[in-house]
Amino acid sequence: MEPMIVNPLEAFAVLNEDPRANYVDVRSVVEFAVSHPKSARVFNVPLVFFHPTTKAVHSNDSFLLVMN
């Protein structure tokens, strides 16, 4: 199945209508913790990580491994 890119309202509708649907949020851990859709089928797999002190951006080298 190909991933869908949808806006928040479309995502809400799909999660409510399709029990096979999952929502993958690729924002940072902090952004996800602040606000995300509330569902058991919502997952956070960040594309990047931010160093807590320097704020340097580090890519998530495990992103593709986790998504597969």
Image (tube, rainbow, N blue to C red):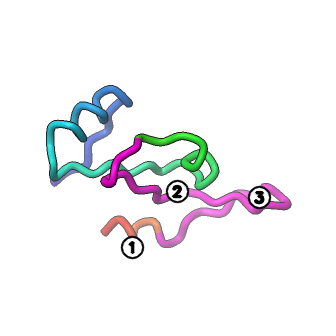
The residue stretch that appears in magenta:
38-62
Residue type pointed to by label 3: Ala
User: Which mark is first along the chain, 3 or 2?
Assistant: 2
Tell me the residue that label 1 is attached to: 65
* Residue at horizontal 16 percent and vertical 52 percent from the top: 20
User: Which mark is first along the chain, 1 or 2?
Assistant: 2
The x, y position of residue 8, in whole percent, is: 38, 30
Q: Are marks 2 and 1 in contact (CB under 8 Å)?
A: no
Asked if the stretch drawn in magenta spans residue 4, the answer is: no
Task: Compute the Cα span from label 2 to label 1.
Answer: 12 Å
Determine whether the residue tagged by mark 3 lies in a helix, strand or loop.
Answer: loop
Disc number at residue 56?
3
Q: Residues within 10 Å of mark 3 (few under 14, many from 20)?
A: few
Task: Compute the Cα span from label 2 to label 3.
Answer: 14 Å
- Residue 32 versus residue 62 in the image, above or below: above
Tell me the residue that label 2 is attached to: 47
User: Which mark is first along the chain, 1 or 3?
Assistant: 3
* Residue at horizontal 40 percent and vertical 43 percent from the top: 38
Q: Quick one: 60 or 53, which is closer to the camera?
A: 53
- Residue 58 versus residue 40 in the image, above or below: below
Q: Residues within 10 Å of mark 1 (few under 14, many from 20)?
A: few
Determine whether the residue tagged by mark 1 lies in a helix, strand or loop.
Answer: helix
Query: Where the N terminus falls, by quadrant?
Result: bottom left
Task: Compute the Cα span from label 3 to label 1.
Answer: 23 Å
